[in-house]
Image (cartoon, helix red, strand yellow):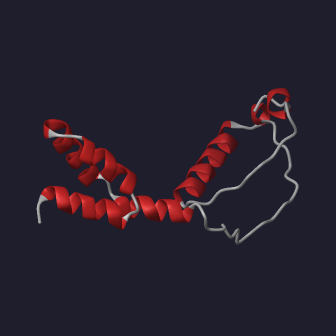
Amino acid sequence: MDKIQDTINLLKMYNQEHVIKLLNQLEGKEKERLIEQINKIDFHQLMELYDNTKKEIEIKENKIENITYLDKAKLSKEQREEFDTLGEKVIRNREYAVVTMAGGQGTRLRT
């Protein structure tokens, strides 16, 4: 098979017939450039990404609890370094937490 037919088969496989219509309207260098661009696309990965948008995400742990407030300005240098180290460790371990504050709290608390 030639490159054009291979490209057409690829487009059909991924339901991209509308691109075939455009391809058939082009000639020469324009057609060659479009074929090159099409063949650089990872249609399989695109379809996986698209299919993943339809999946429902399961949250394995959903815990809401109050947190205590610490005034960063009142922490000692050692305490700030300890929190920095702890934060870096959490990020490296791909752990995280979510904190929600009422609008403007970040500004008022200078965080």
Q: Quadrant of the C terminus?
A: top right
Is 88 located above or below residue 76 in the figure? Answer: below
Residue 1 position within the rendered picture, expressed as x and y whole percent measured from the top left? 11, 66
Nearer the observer, 73 or 33: 33
Nearer the observer, 36 or 92: 36
Q: Is residue 103 left or right of residue 32?
A: right
Q: Is residue 92 left or right of residue 56?
A: left
Q: Quadrant of residue 33?
A: top left
| Residue drawn where x is 61% and y is 60% of the image | 95
Q: Is residue 60 left or right of residue 53?
A: right
| Residue drawn where x is 24% and y is 54% of the image | 39
Nearer the observer, 70 or 109: 109
Is 52 located above or below residue 97 in the figure? Answer: below
Residue 2 position within the rendered picture, expressed as x and y whole percent measured from the top left? 11, 60
Q: Quick check: can you spot residue 46?
A: yes
Q: Quick check: can you spot residue 37?
A: no
Q: Quadrant of residue 70?
A: top right
Nearer the observer, 58 or 45: 45
Q: Is residue 40 left or right of residue 65?
A: left
| Residue drawn where x is 64% and y is 48% of the image | 82
Residue 44 position within the rendered picture, expressed as x and y whole percent measured from the top left? 37, 64
Residue 78 position within the rendered picture, expressed as x and y whole percent measured from the top left? 65, 42
Instruction: Count the marks.
Output: 0
